[in-house]
Amino acid sequence: MKQVILYTDGACSGNPGVGGWGAVLIYNGHEKRISGAQESTTNNRMEITAVIEGLKCLNQPCSVQVYSDSAYTVNAFEMGWVYGWRSAGWVKADKKPVLNSDLWQELLVLTEVHKVKFNKVKGHADNEYNNICDKLATDAIKNFKKN
């Protein structure tokens, strides 16, 4: 199984507001950088979208190490929250609906295709690839606002 490293980040100008996401895939010494933006969204939605879009670039099942500065995204998988939400019909313990359930469901499908391990990195620090993803996301917002 191919080993892939995926760095991701999301950003929002206003929350909600115009949002952007960025991802860097690394495989066998090669890098692929992707990004995008959406109108009226949230930072959390962009964080999840970055992982989804990165995984969608893979054309076969891979072993993927995901690095994100989003505790929300990483903890949902590492603490098992997403599996509990799915079992409960996308309703939380307080009986309120799970936010972003559409994205969580899409991401769950992708994590069942690939062997995915989520890793938390410190944001806006000295992690080169996290900083690249942050710039991809913020540039996507700037470019979206110009058009």
Image (cartoon, helix red, strand yellow):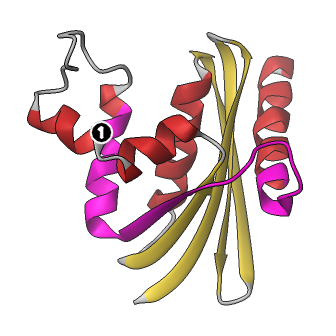
- Local packing at callout 1 (Cα closer than 10 Å; few below 14, some 14-19, many 20+) is some
Q: Which residues are magenta?
A: 103-131
Q: Position of residue 121 (x, y in %)?
A: 68, 53
In the picture, the quarter occupied by the N terminus is bottom left
Q: Quadrant of the C terminus?
A: top right
Query: Residue 104 magenta-drawn?
Result: yes
In the structure shown, which secondary structural element does the residue marked by tag 1 occupy?
Answer: helix
Q: Is residue 95 above or below residue 78?
A: above
The disc labelled 1 sits on which kind of residue? Trp
The foreground one among 139 and 72 is 72
Q: Is residue 12 magenta?
A: no
**In terms of depth relative to the viewer, which is nearer, 28 or 120?**
120
Q: Nearer the viewer, residue 24 or 121?
A: 121
The answer to which quarter of the image holds residue 29 is bottom right
Describe residue 4's horizontal placement relative to residue 32 as left or right. Answer: left
For mark 1, what is the residue? 81
Q: Position of residue 22 (x, y in %)?
A: 70, 47
Give the residue at x 81% y 18%.
Answer: 145
Rendering coords of residue 125 (x, y %): 86, 48
Q: Going 76% across and 43% down the picture, which residue do you hit? A: 123
Indicate the quadrant where residue 87 lies. Answer: top left
- Residue at 33% x, 57% y is 110
From the viewer's side, name the closer residue of 39 and 134: 134
